[in-house]
Image (cartoon, grey):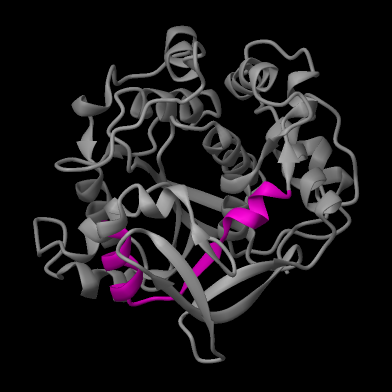
Amino acid sequence: MRLLAMLFGCALFTGCTLNAAKEAAPVTVEDTKSHIIFDTDMAPDYDDVGALALLHALADFGETEILATVSSNKCETTVPCLEVINTYFGRPDIPVGCVKGEAHDQSTWHEGLRWTEELPKNYPHTTEKASDSRDALEVYREVLSKQPDKSVTLIVVGMLTNMRNLLQSKADEYSDLDGVDLIKQKVDHVVCMGGSYPDGREFNIYCDSTAAVTAINEWPTPIYFSTWEIGDAVRTGKRLAQSGIKGNPIVDTFTMCLAQDDPEGHSSWDQTAALVGAIGVEPFFKAVPGTFIIADDGSNKWEMSDTGKHYHLEFNRSKEEVTNYIETLMMYQPRK
């Protein structure tokens, strides 16, 4: 088990430094860490912001490496917001891209509150709009081609459009392999925030159901699904909104949005998926094998099977413990 006790079981105060947190940890960091590509729809909802903050915190603790951050949403503010967060956490050079061609375009649904416009106004970033960025598929193929075999975890917390595009891609300047063979060689597994258990129709899947059908049915490595019910049970953000911290884009986002949404906290759909992608299923969850059965309209059901290549998550710790761990990571502030 990787380093979890650095935060789990101890209360880190606001503004805690990396060294102070490590001194509080009763276990030793292992040499291994996860290598992540974060694929998000960054705009309709704001749990993506908390998920990326969580990954940066774990990267500062040596638990993970963020290889790239890409958007499956063509909304023009997606890439600027990704760059804002990457830059705030001291990683402005992380490759960033956005889906090109036919794809979903979804701005925030918080009426009168365009948080995705506010962040780029107030924080440094390089790209003015998503359409000016690199193609997410190009970023995927270049980054994957440079990684050791079976070393990459994809965390997909938006539509599955980029997954489909990668599957169907051909050899290019970055790799002589087509998409399927490149995935087989470089990707260990995917953690996807998507679908419902035992059945239902969830946003990330039905928004581009055509891509989802192809991606889920044809993907050659295991896919772990953090379904709607998992994230909905974990409400975070209240501590951020009440912290009074200034100059922090994560705090700003949750302060703006919770006031309109729910002051007691927001569902952590993307954070639960990001946590599992970064540190693994245990100790907070367990993975149950089966097959994710998807219909053309994006609805799904689960077929239980010990030999299935898909997994759905179930809680292995209390929801309160999971909530505290995720929110503490979201509260982390980088050293300046």
* Residue 146 in view (yes/no): no
Which residue is drawn at the image coordinates 81% and 54% (left, top)? 319
Which residue is drawn at the image coordinates 31% and 28% (left, top)? 75
* Residue 256 in view (yes/no): yes
Q: Quadrant of the N terminus?
A: bottom right
Residues in magenta, as a range: 211-233
Which residue is drawn at the image coordinates 73% and 47% (left, top)? 234
Up/down of 26 relative to 216, above or below: above
> Residue 18 lies in magenta, yes or no?
no
Which residue is drawn at the image coordinates 28% and 52% (left, top)? 162
78 on left or right of 54 = left
Question: x, y (%) of residue 258?
Answer: 68, 22
Extreme top residue here? 121
70 on left or right of 314 = left
Q: Using the image as rendered, state which of residue 215 and residue 54 is in the foreground.
A: 215
Question: x, y (%) of residue 263?
Answer: 76, 23
Question: x, y (%) of residue 288?
Answer: 62, 78
Question: x, y (%) of residue 183?
Answer: 29, 69
